[in-house]
C-alpha cells in the first residue's frame, strides 16, 4: 500500500533490517532501537542559534481559557438537551460522535496545553484550570496526565519512562489487522491504563482535588440532569479516543510510517528513523494545532497559536521532515498496512528523566524556552 500520507524526502532504512537487528539485541522484539539522544533538543538548539527571536514566542496564550470555557459550556448544554434521549438512539450516538467526541478531544488537548503552563502564568492556576477542563470528560485524569506527559517530553522513547510507547505485550498480541483495529477502537483505554502498568505516580493533593471535583460534577449531572446526560459525556470521551478523525493524532505523532528504500544502496546507507511526525491539515483548527508535533516537541513552551509562526520562521528545519497529510488516512493505513503497527516506534534504553514534582515547574519552563542552551542568552 503506498504511503502517500508521509513525504518521502527523508529515506530511512528498511523495517526488515531494523527488525532483524532488534531481534538480535532486544529479546525478539521488533521496535526501532536508537542509541542516540532524541532529536528535539538538538534541533531546538540549532533553531535558537539561527533564529533567537523564536524564544519570544514562549509563554501563556490568553485565548486558551476562553475556548475551554466555550467547549465546557457546549458539552454541558448538549448533555442537558439529550437528558431524555435514549443513549442507544441514533440521535444520541450521532451527537456523541460528531459533537461530543470532537469537543472532548478538544478538551483533551486543552489539558495538554495547560500541562505545559500555557493558559496562565501561575502553575497553580494551570493545575486548577486543567481540572475544570476535565469536567465534561467524565473521568478524572488531568492531574495524572501532566507528569506522565512531561516525562514523555523529557524521556522520548525511553523504555520504562515514556508511557506513550506500546509495550512488547501489546505489540505482540495486536500485530494483525484485527488487533490493530481493536487498538484503534479502544486506544483511549490503552492510553488511560498503560501508564499505571509502567510506573505509578504518588497521590498528591492535586490528584485528590481532581478526583473529588470530577466525582462531584458527575454526581450533580446525575442528580439534576440525569443518567443519560452523564452517559453522553462518557460516550463522547470514548468516541474521542476511538475511530474518530481527530483521534488520528494519537497514532500520527510518533508511529513510524516508513517508505521502503528505493534501492539497495539506500538500504545499505540508512539515515536515522524519524521519531515525531507533524500534520498540517485543517483538523488542527479543532485540536490546538497538536498536528504541529515536531514544532511542539522542539519548543513545548510555545503555545498553540504561535506554533505556525515558529514553523514559518524555522521553515528550513521542518520542510524536509516527513509529515502526514490526513489523520483519517493515518488510521486506515495503520490498520491495513502490514508494514505499520505497534512495533513501529523508536525506543532507547537510556536518557531522559521522570517529571513528578511541583518544584520542577521553573526548571521545566526554563528548559523548554531554551535557557541554558550554549550561545543563548
Image (cartoon, grey):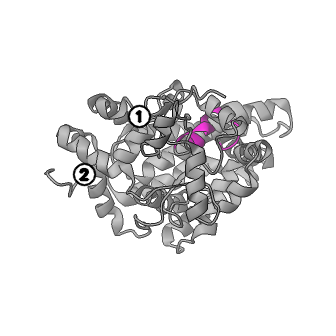
Q: Position of residue 338 (x, y in %)?
A: 70, 39
| Marking on residue 267 | none
x, y percent for residue 14: 55, 42
Residue at 29 percent of width and 62 percent of height: 362
Q: Tag 1's secondary structure? A: loop
Reading the image, the residue beneath label 2 is 370
Q: Residue at x 20, y 58 (%)?
A: 372
Label 1 – label 2 distance at C-alpha: 22 Å
- Residue 84 can be seen, yes or no: yes
- Taking the spot 61% from the left edge, 34% from the top edge, the residue there is 330
Relative side of 237 to 150, left or right: right
Residue shown at 41% from the left, 34% from the top:
321
Q: Does 137 appear in magenta?
A: no
Start-end of magenta stretch? 241-253
Residue 100: quarter of image: top right
Residue topped by disc 1:
321
Left or right: residue 315 compared with residue 151: left
Amino acid at each position: 500500500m503506498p504511503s502517500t500520507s508521509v513525504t518521502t524526502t527523508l529515506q530511512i532504512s528498511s523495517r526488515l533490517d531494523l527488525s532483524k537487528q532488534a531481534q538480535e539485541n532486544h529479546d525478539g522484539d521488533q521496535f526501532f532501537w536508537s542509541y542516540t539522544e532524541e532529536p528535539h533538543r538538538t534541533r531546538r538548539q540549532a533553531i535558537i542559534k539561527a533564529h533567537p527571536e523564536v524564544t519570544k514566542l514562549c509563554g501563556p496564550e490568553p485565548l486558551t481559557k476562553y475556548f475551554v470555557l466555550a467547549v465546557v459550556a457546549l458539552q454541558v448544554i448538549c448533555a442537558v438537551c439529550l437528558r431524555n434521549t435514549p443513549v442507544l438512539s441514533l440521535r444520541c450516538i450521532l451527537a456523541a460522535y460528531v459533537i461530543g467526541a470532537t469537543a472532548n478531544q478538544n478538551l483533551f488537548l486543552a489539558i495538554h496545553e495547560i500541562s505545559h503552563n500555557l493558559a496562565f502564568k501561575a502553575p497553580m492556576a494551570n493545575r486548577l484550570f486543567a481540572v475544570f477542563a476535565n469536567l465534561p470528560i467524565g473521568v478524572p485524569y488531568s492531574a495524572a496526565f501532566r507528569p506522565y506527559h512531561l516525562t514523555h517530553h523529557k524521556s522520548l522513547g525511553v523504555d520504562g519512562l515514556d508511557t506513550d510507547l506500546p509495550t512488547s505485550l501489546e505489540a505482540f498480541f495486536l500485530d494483525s489487522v484485527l488487533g490493530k483495529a481493536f487498538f484503534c477502537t479502544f486506544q483511549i483505554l490503552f492510553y488511560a491504563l498503560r501508564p499505571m502498568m509502567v510506573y505509578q505516580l504518588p497521590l498528591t493533593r492535586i490528584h485528590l482535588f481532581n478526583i473529588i471535583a470530577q466525582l462531584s460534577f458527575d454526581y450533580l449531572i446525575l442528580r439534576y440532569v440525569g443518567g443519560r446526560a452523564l452517559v453522553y459525556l462518557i460516550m463522547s470521551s470514548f468516541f474521542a479516543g476511538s475511530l474518530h478523525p481527530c483521534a488520528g493524532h494519537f497514532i500520527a505523532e510518533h508511529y513510524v510510517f516508513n517508505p521502503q528504500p528505493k534501492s539497495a544502496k539506500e538500504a545499505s546507507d540508512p539515515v536515522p528513523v524519524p521519531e515525531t511526525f507533524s500534520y498540517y491539515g485543517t483538523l488542527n483548527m479543532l485540536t490546538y494545532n497538536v498536528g504541529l508535533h515536531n514544532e511542539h516537541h522542539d519548543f513545548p513552551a510555545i503555545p498553540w497559536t504561535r506554533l505556525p509562526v515558529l514553523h514559518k520562521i524555522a521553515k528550513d528545519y521542518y520542510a524536509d521532515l516527513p509529515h502526514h497529510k490526513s489523520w483519517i488516512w493515518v488510521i486506515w493505513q495503520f490498520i491495513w498496512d502490514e508494514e505499520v503497527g505497534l512495533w513501529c516506534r523508536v525506543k532507547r534504553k537510556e536518557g531522559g528523566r521522570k517529571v513528578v514534582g511541583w518544584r520542577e515547574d521553573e526548571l521545566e519552563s526554563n528548559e523548554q524556552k531554551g535557557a541554558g542552551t550554549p550561545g543563548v542568552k
